[in-house]
Amino acid sequence: MSQAQHVAGSQQDWTQRYTGAVMNTFGTPQRVLVRGAGTEVTDADGRTYTDLLAGIAVNCLGHAHPAVVAAVTEQLSTLGHVSNIFTSPAQIRLAEELAGIVFPSCAPQETRVFLANSGTEANEAAFKIARRHGGTARPRVLALEQAFHGRTMGALALTHKAAYREPFEPLPGGVEFVPAGDVQALAAAMGPDVAALIIEPIQGEAGVRELPEGYIAQARELTRAAGALLIIDEVQTGMGRCGAWMAHHLLAPGVVPDVVTLAKGLGGGIPIGAVVASGAAASLLQPGQHGTTFGGNPVACAAALAVIDTIRSQGLLERVRELGEQWAGQLSALEGVTQVRGRGLLRGVGLAEEVGPASEVAAELLEAGFIVNAPRPHTLRLAPPFVLSDEQAGAFTAQLGRILASRLTQAGAA
Ligand SMILES: *Cc1c(COP(=O)(O)O)cnc(C)c1O
């Protein structure tokens, strides 16, 4: 069968087949997508959408970027997979690149990288590093309220939302949650029995909430004084998403964490995660203590190398910063928008109560041809490809303005 025949069929047909074949963990998918190019995707009924979510902050270069397609094609047709009994130039080159990107102030001999396949796996490895730090003398791990670190058992134990955690208890023990952004509470919880503190510099699933100014630096001081590791989860915020390679570079210049986890945008659409560690944390996992069959897969590494090279050669960090600032200014001027949070091209748009549920606004936007999501009842999340044009950003702002105005008028009339 040709590719065209494989994807023939209406959205309705496909959705029915989805329900009959795929576990119901995600609810009914919003659309059946068959094609993507740049910032646009096309559904099975032939409608196109501007993708302002990018697979949840994944497709940082948009869909089918020629550099990623070429790198993956070339690597797959040369050497596709080798396992960790062997290595490949792609894996080694990526590890070297990541060390420099994440820890620009560290010498190469102070840093080490572990390659995984997703965000949750990167956090699992970070959790295991924390367990190796201090052993039974440091049984406690601190995480923040509203934190999201993934869905596998270890990462889930670090995730705050009770509805995600409780059906799967007992989870790995020792995790305690402290209020996000509260230095006093962190200082009170910190102690010589703490192995690690894990934080997201901007809490994405919580509605794109930035930690208050100074918090990350204080967290570094408190963890250092207690001898605990500082783990920064940059799975959503890293790889240029916020207008710097790492969000903590922007929010806490000069702070050097012990461990940084990456995934989402790293492979530009190919599944890959990474743990990048500095200092003593870089050698806590000993031979045989952790592993993954696919981790460091040459195709995934080639994709990540193409992403890094393209962000660099196209000046995309600067572009993300500039477009992000300009767009946030325009969005915050809309009536019905209470606040625009976040940095660069990771934005939470807070909506006024009278506008109604953000999920309804997202559904209207989808009908109008724009993909966003609603991580919280009154927040829309924007995480578009870095190649979004000024015109596309402006078209979205205008459409959102129309939808909000009409909903405000209805609310006023009711
Ligand atoms: C998405 C996300 C994860 C989990 O990544 P997966 O690839 O879905 O496992 C972990 N941490 C943060 C901050 C995330 O946004």
Image: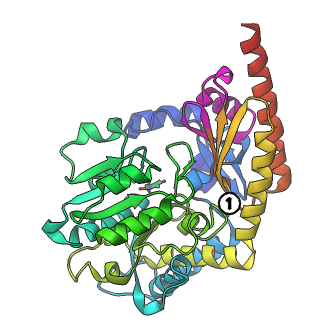
- Whether residue 392 sits left or right of residue 170 in the image: it is right
Instruction: State which quadrant residue 141 falls in.
Output: bottom left
Given residues 179 and 89, the one toward you in this image is 179
Find numbered disc 1 in the image and state the secondary structure of the residue it sits on.
Answer: loop
Residue 263 visible from this viewpoint: no
Q: Tell whether 206 sits left or right of 370.
A: left
Say which amino acid is labelled 1.
Gly
Quadrant of the displayed image that contains ligand 1: bottom left
Image x and y of residue 59, in percent: 61, 59
Q: Which residue is depicted at the point 50% across and 45% down?
A: 205
**Residue 69 position within the rendered picture, expressed as x and y whole percent measured from the top left:** 63, 71
- Place of residue 266 in the rendered image (x, y in percent of width and height, measured from the top left): 54, 68
Q: Is residue 240 left or right of residue 256?
A: right
Near-viewer residue (358 or 143):
143
Tell me the residue at 57%/57% (across/down): 213
Is 244 in front, or is 80? 244
Color scheme of the displayed model:
rainbow
Q: Which residue is mark 1?
A: 62
Q: Which residues are magenta?
A: 352-379
Label 1 within 8 A of ligand 1 by Cβ: no
Q: Residue 127 at what x, y percent from top left?
A: 29, 64
Could you tell me which residue is drawn at 79 percent across and 30 percent down? Answer: 335
Note whether 6 is above or below 31 in the view shown: below
Quadrant location of residue 375? top right
Q: Is residue 182 visible?
A: yes
Quadrant in which the N terminus appears: bottom right
Residue 366 part of the magenta-drawn span? yes
Dot 1, crowdedness within 10 Å: few (<14), some or many (≥20)?
many
Q: Residue furthest right?
A: 391
